[in-house]
Each structure stands twice: as structure tokens, then as C-alpha cells.
Amino acid sequence: EDGGPNPEKDCGHDRGGMGEEVKRKEDRRFITGRGNYVDDIKKEGMLHCEIVRSPHAHANVESINTERAEKMDEVVAVLTAEDLAAHDLATMPTLMDDTQEVLVRDKVKFQSQEVAAVIATDRYAAKDGAERVEVEYDTLDPVVEAEKAKDEDAPVVREDLDQDDNHIFTWETGDEEATEEAFEEAPVTVEEDMYYQRLHPAPIETCGCVADWDQDDEKMTVHMTSQAPHAHRTLFSMVSGIPENKVRIVSPDVGGGFGNKVPIYPGYVVAAAASYVLERPVKWVEERSENIQTTSFARDYDMTGRIAATEDGEITAVDVDVLADHGAYNAAAQPSKFPAGFFKIFTGSYDIEHAHGTVDAYYTNTAPGGIAYRCSFRVTEAVYLIERMVKALAQELDMDPAEVRRKNFIPKEAFPYESSTGWTYDSGDYERALDKALESVDYDELREEQQRRIANDDDKLLGIGLSTFTEIVGAGPGKQCDIAGVEMFDSAEIRVHPTGNATVRIGVQTQGQGHETTFAQIVAEELGLDVEDVTVEHGDTDTEPYGLGTYASRSTPVGGAATAVAARKVREKAKSIASNELEVAEEDVVWDRQSGAFHVKGAPDRSLTIEEIAGASYMNSPPDEEPGLEAVDYYDPPNMTFPFGAYVCVVEVDRETGEVDIRNFYALDDCGNRINPMIVEGQVHGGVAQGIGTAMLEHVTYDDEGNVTAGDFMNYLLPTSMEIPEIETDYTVTPSPHHPIGAKGVGESPTVGSPPAVVNAVVDAMEHAGVTHVDMPMTPDRVWEVLDDAGLAI
Ligand code: CDP
């Protein structure tokens, strides 16, 4: 099952089931401009909210004068922390149990922090009003980098806490003593410093909401760009004191999330409070620069990796120390028991006996964050670390990096495999993936071309970068993983209607991934329905079953599993009805997946489809069976799934300009059984583009005063189609043994796996001159400096 004709496509029917490249149902409304995003929502009497933000990164608020704003005819109200405090809404909890001010009361802790809010009859007036709010600040010295925040005499960011330094936590994993011993005994050790820079997830649609308090019903309805509507309903209820059954969160179409829309931001709380006080709907929608400068960032891990090995390249130990910048509040969005997310997957695809790692996190005067940007909670940083270290080891040993990988892969017979940091990998076949990748790109020929260029003193150097990563996606299990205390299960409810079509309601929330199609495919496969006859609904907490939301590629591993199990429950009931209809014992009724029908054992022509059974279940239900045909499943996964990939990036490095041209990007992904190969391919294209942006362009930078110097798209550079090469996708299929349909997640694999492939390629191009590392983003000036230092520049 490693390529050639698509093995899963042969599902034996054409109803749009598993493995079919069904066109995305949702695209009709998207490409005809009929998507319905938060900013499209207009309500009778709706007001607009604009936030007054601090120009300083660290400053005491001396006074706030709202008079000039309040005098404007269009301004209905100006809110400050005092007003919120009157309703007990001055602070809100972050997902990591920190307390964040909704509007600053005393001290600003990062540039653009929320200080006041103006509510007006239109957006322009609200903005004018915000400019008329006069705030007097007394500026303080800021601390902008984690390295400086460590200093004993560094300014203290969080004087509201019971501590006089900036330390947040120290987290540790693995066996330090055994790892140190392995390092002492190892004939070869390599150390490398690398910085995974601060990134912004940059969804096309910024964050926003329309809050609408209904005084008659005493109910708060919030339409918001949420990746996790149910969790947000619980948090809204907890923060506001409004009973949860009187809070309705609706996520309409969401224009990209990438982790940015998992946390709750002050704007949501302000809009809801304003609606409550004014008894009118209030809309708050961020501008682009507000989104970049204030909503949660990702990464910002300063890492020192060490790797120990034998002379022939067998890795014996890995160790890593991380200095993490969490900004002004600990507002990472991840399961609460994992302060460093899933970073402890840093042994990667390799069978490494000894491992040890620490993460030290600090507050700084920068926006809060540490969210999982298209990544399973710090797995991206972990993958970068190990994939870079394996390359560094190969370089030290003068071995081919493919060989070092092959030598250390967890062998396929070893699954389920327990890693030295305590994960149980479900399944994998890394060598097959690597072999296929090397063959597909003609690796040997590439290596020859590289040598030819060096021998000819060519102006452009060739670099070949590999990344053979493993991911960990699909959080829960609930006992291990929770968000704000709620266990990380997910859910699906299926109703088959009397005329034989179905509505599926799911707890996960699409932001462009195509769930309306793929989740319908799962049901089509399991129930023998045509995919066109299955409608998927999501995003409304009044109607959908409770789920923890979509991020960290958990939809398919958890929500997809719930959907398959719910469908099987429906099928179980259908079987009993079929036996009644066919007048045979239940054990004599068999399900035929190919025809999508039940038939009498040994008599295939005596059959009934789900459509026919649905009719019977409402119109002729058996005496001992409840009428109707529906089921719900809350699925708590027994383990996570471990998708993997083998990526090859080929670059040309211009010795004259430092420019890096990505000539070819090959991405082989194994996400187990694929529901829709076309959608999987689309996910890989998007993720690789984001990974290339990470490697080459993106970085949220600050100056020494804490001013965000890359706070808009002129300075925070996103890749465009000009920078993205043709991406060649490929796959192998290693099903997850514990997932009901053998699927693993895939959405974030390419963002996680591609940055090290690109960096390894650039280093590879220059390693003959002793270059061992280039930090991201690898802008031409940075690469040129490295070329110059190595004597390669011309
Ligand atoms: O949680 P999120 O939807 O971001 O990630 P995912 O579960 O990896 O799914 C991304 C998209 O790819 C969804 O439409 C999935 O149903 C689809 N997918 C698939 O077709 N086959 C897989 N094995 C995994 C995902």
C-alpha cells in the first residue's frame, strides 16, 4: 500500500465514502461569495466596539479621561476597567490558569494592550472616539527578551503576582542522570543552539464577535470566530456567571484559525459586557495589526540541543534545554497538565535510549501566547530540534543524513513503541517512507549534482534537506488532556430521517479543513448512504453535542472516531430493524459494505438499504425497539495518533546575494487511512507553504522599548505564491490500530515537518565550508552573512 493506484480509493462503491476524492461541499458557498463570517453579521440596533490600546510596552496608567469621546453623538459608551469591575469582569482566566486583565487597571504589560473600549453606532465613529480617549502613562523600563527577563535586576512584569522575578515555570522530562552518563560515555557528541522564532498564525480573517444579550430571555448569544465553541461557552459562563444554558456560542464560517482562535481575548469579553449593559448587540472585529500585535503568538523557544552517538552513527542520547518566552501572561493554549505542550516528543522518529529535556518559561513585556500554531502543542519545536540535531550529527560524522536516520529509526516491528520520554507511538513504518522519498527525488543524482557544483565553483550551491518527522495528534485521552478542566473527548450525533437522508452534528469546528465533506464521507461509508445525502452541522452550541474543538489536528483522530462510532451505533439499531423487516433472526442479517445494505445471510437479493430501514424505523418500528434512527457518541480516545512523514527540500543558495531558491519540495505523508486524499493533499500544500514562510520570512520582532517592529503585513512577511515552489505530494498508508477507521490526523504535519527540511537544505548547501546552522527566518541578508563568514560569498 505504498503508492501507485490509490489503495483506499478502491472502496468498491461510488457513494463518496472513505478514500474518495469528493469535491468539497462547502466550496460552493465560499467560491460564490456566500460564506458567512462574523463581520458579515448585521443585527438590528447593532453597536460597534473599538479598543483603546497602549502605545507603550510597560507603563503605569495614571489617568483615563473619556470625556471627549463621550461627547460624540455617535458614542454610546466608553468602558474602562472600573466599569468592568462593577460587573466582576475586570479579569479573565487564561487557558493555563493565569489571570489576564480585560482592560488595564494599573499597569500596561505589553504594547497595544487593551486599556479602554469605545462603543458607538458605527465603526468609524468608534475609532474616532477611541482616538479621543486620553490616557496618561508613566512609562517603565520594559524587558523584552526571555534571556534578559532572567536577570535578577530585570524589571518585573507581573507585580500583581506573589513573586519578585519573571519566572513562570520549569518543566523537566526524562532521566537526567542516565542521559548525562550516556553523554560522558559517548565517543561523539554534538551541540547546537537554535532559536525557533516568535511567529504569528495569521489567519486571513482576524478575531471578532457579535455579542447579543437578550434581556427578555436573559440569554447571551455570541457569534464568534472560535475554534472551540463549546469550551468557549463554558468559559464565558464561568467568567460572566450567566448559566451555561443561557450562553449560546455560534461559530459561523471561520476564515482560518491555526490556533489563533483557541484562546479567549479581551475584545470578546468587552463586547459581551457592553451588550449586557447596553442591551444591544455589539460587534468587535480586530484590524490586522491588532491581530498580529495582541492575539496569541506561537513558538519563541530558544533551544540548546545536544546529541550523543557511537562512531558509526547510532544515537545513544539526546538532551535539550529551552528558554521559553510566554509574554506578559501565561496564555498558552494547550492541555493544562502540559506546561510545555507535547514538547517531550523530541526523540522524534528515532529509537533513543536516553533523553532529557527542560523548559524554563519567563514573562516579558510582549503580547501573551505560546499557542499551538498549526501544531500539536509544541510538537513543532520538538521536531525542529531533533531533525536539526540528526543533521548536525551526520555532519559531525561525515555520514549521509539519510543513513543516520535509517540507522536510528524505530523499526516497524517495534510498534506500539514506548519512547524514553513516555509516549506510546501507535504505528509507523519510517524506513519505507524514507526509501520512497529518496527514490522519488532521485537522491543519489542530487548528491552528485551538489558535488559537481562545488567542484565547478558554481555561483549557486545546491542543498538537500531531509525531515523524517513523527507527529503526535488527537488529544485526549481525557484523563491525560483537559482544557480548563474539561476532558478532551469529542462527539458526534447522527440522525437518519424518515426519507433516508441524514444530519450529522459534530463537536469539532472547521476553519477551512473541509469537515462538511470528510465527516459526511465517514457516515456515507459506514451507513451506505450517498455523501450528498449527509449534511454536517457544527459550530452552534445550542444544537451540537459538546466537543473540545478543532486544533492540533485532533478533528479526525477524535471527532472523526466519534462520527464513525455513532454511525456504527445507528447501524446496530438498523440491523435489528432489518431483521424485523426481513423476518429473520438478527444473526442471519449481514452488512455488506460494498452495496451499503443489509441482506439475509446466503440470500443477497433479500436486502434492505439504510434508506429503507429508516422509513421502517419511523413508520413500522419493531415492537421491542424505540422508533427513530439516531445515535450519539462521545469518544474518549485510548491514545493519540502518530502520523509521520518524509520530506525532501532542494534549494539553491546564491553565493552572491544570499537568496535561497526552493527548487523542489517533496512531501510524503502517512496519516493512516485517508478519508479524502484530495483534501489531505490540500492540507499538505497549505502547511508546507506555512512551513516555508516560517523558515524563510516570518518573525514577530520587537525593539528594545518593546515596540512591535513586525506588527503588520509590510513587516511580518507571509509567503506568497511567488515564494512557494511546486509541491510534490506522496503518501504511504500505515493505519492507526486504535482508531475506528484507521485514520491519523494530518492538518499540521506539513507545518511541523517542513521547516527543518528547509533549514537542513540551506545548511547542507554550505556544510562543506563548515557551516553548521542558520537561524530562521533565513532571509537573504542572514544567509549572506553566513556565506561571507564561511568564505563562500562572491
Ligand atoms: O483538526 P483538523 O481538522 O485541523 O485536522 P485533521 O483532523 O488532520 O483534518 C484535516 C482535514 O483532512 C479534515 O477535513 C480531515 O477529515 C481530512 N483528513 C483525511 O481526509 N484523512 C485523514 N487521515 C486525516 C485527515
Image (cartoon, helix red, strand yellow):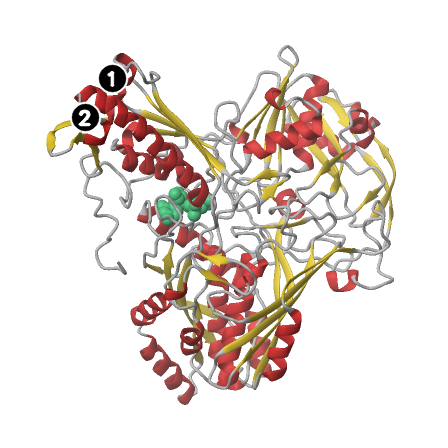
Report if residue 461 is visible in the image: yes
Query: Circle 1 — which element?
Result: helix
Q: Residues within 10 Å of mark 1 (few under 14, many from 20)?
A: many
- Real-space Cα distance between discs 2 and 1? 10 Å
**Position in image of residue 484 (x %, y %):** 64, 39
- Residue 409 left/right relative to 24: right
Q: Quadrant of residue 4?
A: bottom left
Report helix, strand or loop for mark 2. strand
- The dot on residue 676 is none
Q: Amino acid at mark 1?
A: Ala
Q: Residue placed farthest to the top in the image?
A: 216
Residue displayed at 54% across by 73% down? 389
Can you give x and y, in whole percent of width and height, for residue 604 in the image? 12, 32
Res 214 quadrant in image: top right
Q: Which residue is mark 1?
A: 616
Horizontal and vertical percent for residue 123?
64, 29
Image-quadrant location for residue 320: bottom right
Residue 31 visible in this rendered orientation of the protein: no
Q: Mark 2 or mark 1: which comes first in sequence?
A: 2
| Image region (quadrant) for ligand 1 | top left
In depth, the one of 357 and 353 nearer the eye is: 353
Pointer 2: what residue? 608
Judge from the rendering whether residue 679 lies leftward or rightward of residue 302; answer left or right: left
